[in-house]
Image: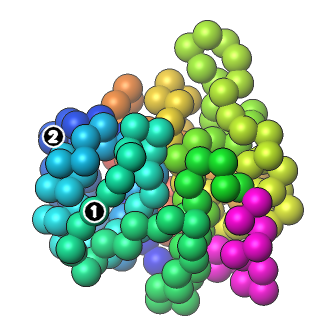
Amino acid sequence: MKILCAADYHREKDLADNVEKLARKERVDVIVNAGDFLSEDFAKKILDKTKFKTFVVRGNWDHELKTKNRNVKILENEIVEYKGYYFLGVDWGYYSKIHELSKGKDPKKLVLITHDPPYDILDMSYFGSNAGVMELREVTEKVKPILHVFGHIHESAGVMKHKGTLFVNAALPEFRKAAIVDLPSQKVDVFDI
């Protein structure tokens, strides 16, 4: 399965348009969006027009996300099966739900989506300190998803593997690069956006 990872559009229409173009060009199966549209109207326009199966969570600036597009599933502390994989999305502060929702699911088929990063994983802020969440790191290490997609800390966008999980900080604004992950191999290709 080819998954295009994105986050933090911050009302930048060109970022959203370029993600769609890349998804078309690379024939991805799914777009995973870790939130932060910065405007409910902007989010609705972007989500309404996508042609791709999309799983999205709210970011810290997203109070409410809405769409009538059947291709889009806004995950609010829930898990959805799609093409043999489980997409689990949680809101800020609901990290204990991850363990509960993933119970009985094969971690090699589990894709976790949060807005914020786990502590000490692609979470270094401009101020030189870790801005991730320790509780999220602890639950992620217990659950061991094959892929964890997040954003929020723009300056630490990138990809790393830790204890079998592939972590993608998909924040786009600073570096304008998007990762496409192939599962189950965890192969990553990075593209300019």
- Left or right? Give the position of 146 relative to 1: right
Relative side of 122 to 65, left or right:
right
State whether the magenta stretch is mostly helix, strand or loop. helix
Question: Is disc 1 placed on a helix, strand or loop?
Answer: loop
Q: Which residue type carries mark 2?
A: Asp
Mark closer to the chain start, 2 or 1: 2
Within the image, what quadrant is residue 108 found in?
bottom right
Q: Is residue 9 visible?
A: no
In percent of the image, x 51 and y 56: which residue is there?
188
Q: Please, what secondary structure does the residue beneath circle 2 have? A: helix
Q: Quadrant of the C terminus?
A: top left
Residue in the image at 47% along x and 85% along y: 82
Tell whether label 1 touches label 2 (CB within 8 Å).
no
Q: Nearer the viewer, residue 52 or 49?
A: 49
In the image: residue 164, left or right of residue 54: right
Give residue 145's position: percent from left, percent from top: 70, 67
Q: Which residues are magenta?
A: 96-110
Pick out the residue farthest to the front. Answer: 63
Residue 109 visible, this angle: yes
Q: Position of residue 5 (x, y in %)?
A: 43, 55
- Say which residue label 2 marks: 14
Instruction: Kindly identify the residue that appears in the image at 78 percent across and 86 percent down.
Output: 104
Measured Cα–Cα span from mark 2 to mark 1: 21 Å
Count of numbered circles on the image: 2
Residue 128 counted in the magenta span: no
- Disc 2: CA contacts within 10 A as few (<14), some (14-19) or many (>=20): few
For disc 1, the marked residue is: 66
The amino acid type of the residue labelled 1 equals Lys
Q: Which quadrant of the view contains residue 38?
A: top left
